Image (cartoon, rainbow, N blue to C red):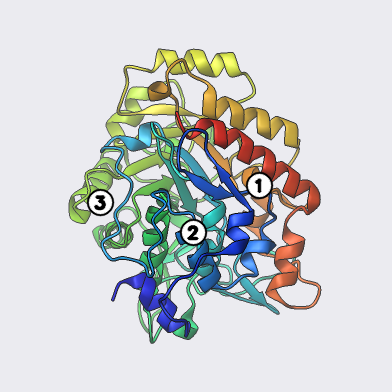
Amino acid sequence: MNTINKLLNALNYTTKLEKDIFTENHTYRALNTNKKWLANIIPVELLNRSVKDALNSIMTLSEGNIFYDEYPSGITTPNYGDKWGRLANYIEINNRAISEMYGNRDCCGILSMIKILPAIFPSARSWANCVIISQIFPNIYGDGYNKGPYEENSIYGIKLNAGYSENIISYDIADKISPEEQLKAFNDLAHFRGIKSGFRMVISADQIKICRPNQEDVTFNWDSSEHVEIYINECVKLMKLGFESMFIDSAKHIGGYDMENYTGVGALPGYSQMQYILHEIRSRSGKTDISFVGEKSTDDFERYKNLGLNAGTDYITGDDFYAVRELSEKFKYLRDYAPGVEVENDNNEGGLSYEQRLNRINTALFGFYLASDKLPSFMQTSDIFPLREDSNTHHIMMTNPSYSTDGSPKSHWENLFAKEEGRHYNHKTGELFAHALGL
């Protein structure tokens, strides 16, 4: 039995699928294609539905207009070649923030990601869309818990060799479908939607702990061959579960580069050491098409390309359409690596208006002379689903507050995001992608 049907059984649903009326009433279509997704929505409308509703919705959106009675086996990732990451749009969704919060406990962020998948845009004809999830591994500061809105609970501190986060996995059903199978089910569904998938990974040594049974956790050490091996193997496991991109936090500073602007905590891998690590992840996973994305770019593009990266963030914003179009023209012959167009990064603490976001998305999607030459781009949850006014992207990365007024997940989801103005904004993003995905 494939992992999607195994997930349904674990949740006590049948595997038989039905057309979803809610989906049919909220479907947006790309011009001149069969690519479909949900828009003009606010996230609670999807998150408050069941996983079975979400799976019915995903099948209802089937690009081939074929409705299967149950999910087939052997779902594969959309094929854009080995260098797909050079052109892709990366959309990071904070899966911890949309997890199920009951009182001060969290769980099931991967199930929430499945519920939100119908509203993530499928890939275009010429380039892929890739959803990056913010958390997979346990976090150091209180995994499985939410805290007050200003208490430390950073997503940037992780534990390796400790399985997967209680924020993310549904451990209530782990005896019926393992954590690994839950992650694979998400990836299979993303691929069925025509979306590629990836995860965020940190490299700052003091932000990583190595765990062993019945022993104290130890701080990661890049000089320890054992620790490096654990790091590689944890990433390889995820690639074998269907992930195909890794967003590397603080990648600009690998090898001690530009350390005066380094804001992480702890030592970083050496340049040749990171080359080895990325090579080993590709080699051991058996995947030649992994996209490694480095946080932040400079003019030293050869340095990033030779490191093994495919794309880099924070080089140019989407504020100036013509500057991005000319940069695209400049890089059109470089097919291994390109700096990217930023809509928003994970350090954003607010201040972007809806109009500025939409302008940046427009630039990211259309800032080129030929679609085959577009630059990669980088977006966050709030670029698709705007957050409430007193929160922001960096805040929900550094803390994990529940905004519930009654201790229920539904109340948290209702209050985490902007409401009717967020719905109108989501409609506007849908209009932009409707014009882009046929390119």
Gap between marks 2 and 1 measured at Cα:
26 Å
Task: Give residue 354's quadrant in the image.
Answer: top right
Amino acid at circle 3: Ile
| Residue 60 image label | 2
Q: Mark 3 points at which residue?
A: 281
Task: Give residue 229's quadrant in the image.
Answer: bottom left
Q: Mark 1 and mark 2 in contact (Cβ < 8 Å)? A: no
- Front residue of 212/238: it is 238
Q: Mark 1 points at which residue?
A: 382
> Closer to the camera: disc 2 or disc 1?
2
Q: Residue at image x 32%, y 50%?
A: 77
Please, is residue 10 above or below residue 22 in the view?
below
> Closer to the camera: disc 3 or disc 2?
2
Q: Residue at image x 72%, y 68%?
A: 412
Mark sitting earlier along the chain (3/1):
3
Q: Where is residue 280 in the image (x, y as percent from the top left)?
A: 21, 50
Please, is residue 171 above or below residue 129 in the view?
below
Mark sitting earlier along the chain (3/2):
2
Please indicate, yes or no, whether residue 193 appears anywhere in the rendered image: yes
Q: Position of residue 327 (x, y in %)?
A: 47, 16
Q: Position of residue 324 (x, y in %)?
A: 53, 19
SS at mark 3? helix
Amino acid at circle 1: Ser
SS at mark 2? helix
SS at mark 1? helix
